Image (spheres, rainbow, N blue to C red):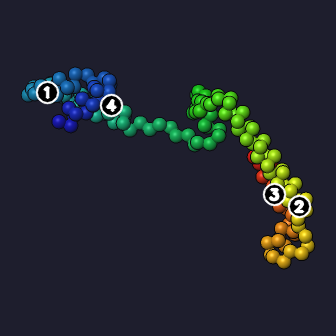
Amino acid sequence: MLLLKLGQLAAGRGWAVPQLTRMMSFVSHSASQQHRLLALRQKLLTTTFRLFSREMPRLPLDAEHLSALITKDITVFTYTNNRFFLLLTIFGGMQFIFWTNLAVFVNADPTVGNSGESRIVRFYIENRQKIAASCICLGNQVI
């Protein structure tokens, strides 16, 4: 029964199985037919063993061997909406202007005096140049 299932599986995949299913359903007591049936069964077993036990050669997936595996260039994603990129550029320019304006205001703040007693005011007075440089760096990252 197992050989019949293997024969049907092999025939379903398009492998050449020479008259095995017909011979499996035919029961004969002749010695030559039994010998022929055993030879076909052995041939089927060796063929299925070879087909199912064949291993693919495994290459390590590094930069050298990866280009050998890829045969075609594949485009994963394309987006050709020019209006979107125009709006994105305008938004980035506005962000750059905002952060630059904030840096100029922090650096040249006329309301800051040396009479601040709060810890936050003292931190702001002592680190105005650092805060302004941070704002300039943020504006440059947006572009």
Q: Nearer the viewer, mark 4 or mark 2?
A: 2
Amino acid on which the number 4 mark rests in the picture: Thr
Whichever of callouts 4 and 3 sits on the residue coming sooner in the sequence is 4
Task: State whether residue 137 appears in this view.
Answer: no
- Neighbor class of circle 2 (other Cα within 10 Å; few <14, some 14-19, many 20+) is few
User: In 3D space, how far apart are the residues under numbered discs 4 and 2 (Cα atoms)?
Assistant: 86 Å
The residue that mark 2 highlights is 109
Q: Nearer the viewer, residue 36 or 11?
A: 11
- Relative to 115, is 55 above or below? above
Q: For the residue marked with disc 3, what is the amino acid?
A: Ser
Q: How many marks?
A: 4
Q: Residue at x 22, y 25 (%)?
A: 20
Q: Residues within 10 Å of mark 4 (few under 14, many from 20)?
A: some
The residue to which callout 3 is attached is 134
Helix, strand or loop at mark 4: helix
Disc number placed over residue 47 in the picture, else none: 4
Name the image quarter holding the N terminus: top left
Vertical side of 100 occupied by 2: above or below: above
Which sits earlier in the primary sequence, circle 2 or circle 1? 1
Numbered disc in front, either 2 or 1: 2
Q: Earlier in the sequence, mark 2 or mark 3?
A: 2
Q: Residue furthest front?
A: 111
Q: Secondary structure at mark 1?
A: helix
Q: Which residue is mark 1?
A: 25
Amino acid at circle 2: Asp
The residue under label 1 is which amino acid type? Answer: Ser
Q: Quadrant of the C terminus?
A: top right
- As measured in the structure, the alpha-carbon distance from the residue carrying label 2 to the one carrying label 3 is 16 Å
Q: In the rendered image of this protein, does residue 122 appear above or below residue 74? A: below
Q: Nearer the viewer, residue 27 or 118?
A: 118
Q: Residue furthest bottom?
A: 117
